[in-house]
Amino acid sequence: MTRPLKPRRIFFDPNVTYFKPRAVPLSLLEEVDLDIDELEALRLCDFKNLEQIEAAKKMKVSQSTLQRILTSAHKKVAEALIEGKAIKIRKG
């Protein structure tokens, strides 16, 4: 039995929740699901240029947990860009 997820603080609610390659119908694309906490980690570390320790404090998680979230997010975004997949942001 796995441990329940600790609630994470998210300060960002994106207006856009879907990205896809241009000129390719959505019905022909595979999707990559990016969780809202992964998007928040990307926003804090890559967009806002916060150190991981600061970002982890803002999200109320440990630095090692933030690192795992960030690694997962980077892998998903890279997969979508390289393989031409759509990115769907999952809230909640």
Image (cartoon, rainbow, N blue to C red):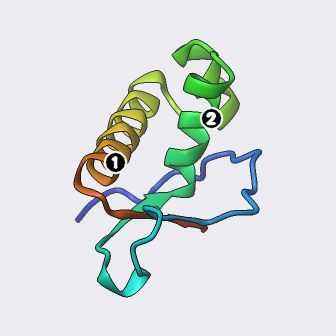
Looking at the rendered image, the quarter that the N terminus falls into is: bottom left
Q: Where is residue 18 in the image (x, y as percent from the top left)?
A: 56, 67
Residue placed at 63% from the left, 16% from the top?
49
The reply to whether residue 60 is in sight is no
Q: Which of marks 1 and 2 is nearer the N terminus?
A: 2
* Residue tagged 2: 43
Q: What residue type is labelled 1?
A: Leu
Q: Which residue is nearer to you in this view: 81 or 14?
A: 81
Residue placed at 42% from the left, 80% from the top?
26
Q: Where is residue 33 in the image (x, y as percent from the top left)?
A: 40, 64
Label 2 residue SS: helix
As drawn, is 28 to the left or to the right of 36?
left
As drawn, is 74 to the left or to the right of 18?
left
Establish if 17 lies above or below 72. Answer: below
Q: Which residue is nearer to you in this view: 58 or 44?
A: 44
Q: What residue type is labelled 2?
A: Arg
Looking at the rendered image, the quarter that the C terminus falls into is: bottom right
Q: Residue 81 carries which label?
A: 1
Q: Where is residue 46 in the image (x, y as percent from the top left)?
A: 56, 25
Q: Residue furthest bottom?
A: 27
Q: Which residue is nearer to you in this view: 86 or 32?
A: 86
- Identify the image quadrant of residue 74: top left
